[in-house]
Image (spheres, rainbow, N blue to C red):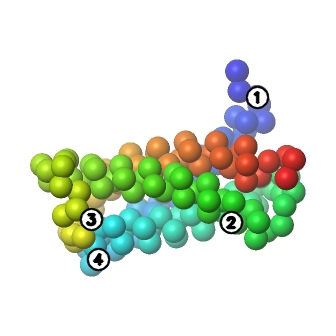
């Protein structure tokens, strides 16, 4: 059974993540209309990573800041990179499936998607969720570890 501390932090982390999802989705919706799909995903992702770090560092894990700011930021980016790979690959696979060609990811990567916002958001959301699970575990156990 998870401890009260983990559950409390998960709630705060989820709220921060929800706000980061809004940042991600708005940036993605705008960028996917004017740039290659992979660029839209990556830029939206980086904006949401920075947003989430600042809020988690000052709210969710403010009592566990044992390492210097820059070290925490770099660790968070490393943890986010793992979740980001999962997010990007999930989004690209879902776009390929949506287009009816799950095998040809190469075409999807360089393509301007130009989809309606709601469709693009629905295809992007599962990757965000999978990335979230990975990021929370690594954040709790490594980035803001009590022993840091």
Question: How many C-alpha atoms fall within 10 Å of the one at disc 2: few (<14), some, or many (≥20)?
Answer: few
Determine whether, in the image, residue 92 is placed left or right of residue 81. left
Please report whichever mark, 2 or 3, sits nearer to the chain's N-terminal start. 2
**Circle 1 residue:** 3
| Horizontal and vertical percent position of residue 113 | 22, 66
Q: Nearer the viewer, residue 110 or 15?
A: 110
Q: For the residue labelled by badge 3, is the local secondary structure a helix, a strand or a loop?
A: helix
Q: For the residue labelled by badge 2, is the local secondary structure a helix, a strand or a loop?
A: helix
Instruction: Point out the frontmost of discs 1 and 3.
Output: 3
Whole-number angstrom distance, CA of label 1 to CA of label 3: 41 Å
**Circle 4 residue:** 35
Question: How many C-alpha atoms fall within 10 Å of the one at disc 3: few (<14), some, or many (≥20)?
Answer: some
Please report whichever mark, 2 or 4, sits nearer to the chain's N-terminal start. 4
Question: How many C-alpha atoms fall within 10 Å of the one at disc 4: few (<14), some, or many (≥20)?
Answer: some
Q: Nearer the viewer, residue 118 or 146?
A: 146
The label shown at residue 74 is 2
Instruction: Point out the frontmost of discs 1 and 2.
Output: 2
Determine whether, in the image, residue 56 is placed left or right of residue 40. right
| Horizontal and vertical percent position of residue 31 | 34, 74
């Amino acid at each position: 059974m998870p401890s009260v501390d983990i559950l409390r932090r998960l709630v705060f982390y989820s709220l921060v993540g929800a706000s980061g999802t809004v940042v991600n989705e708005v940036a993605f919706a705008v960028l996917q209309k004017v740039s290659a799909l992979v660029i839209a995903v990556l830029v939206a992702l980086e904006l949401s990573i920075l947003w989430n770090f600042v809020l988690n560092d000052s709210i969710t894990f403010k009592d566990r800041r044992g390492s210097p700011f820059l070290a925490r930021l770099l660790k968070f980016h490393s943890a986010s990179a793992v979740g980001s790979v999962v997010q990007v690959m999930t989004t690209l696979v879902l776009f390929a499936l949506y287009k009816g060609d799950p095998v040809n990811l190469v075409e999807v990567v360089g393509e301007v998607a130009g989809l309606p916002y709601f469709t693009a958001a629905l295809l992007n959301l599962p990757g965000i969720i999978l990335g979230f699970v990975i990021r929370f575990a690594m954040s709790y156990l490594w980035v803001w570890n009590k022993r840091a």
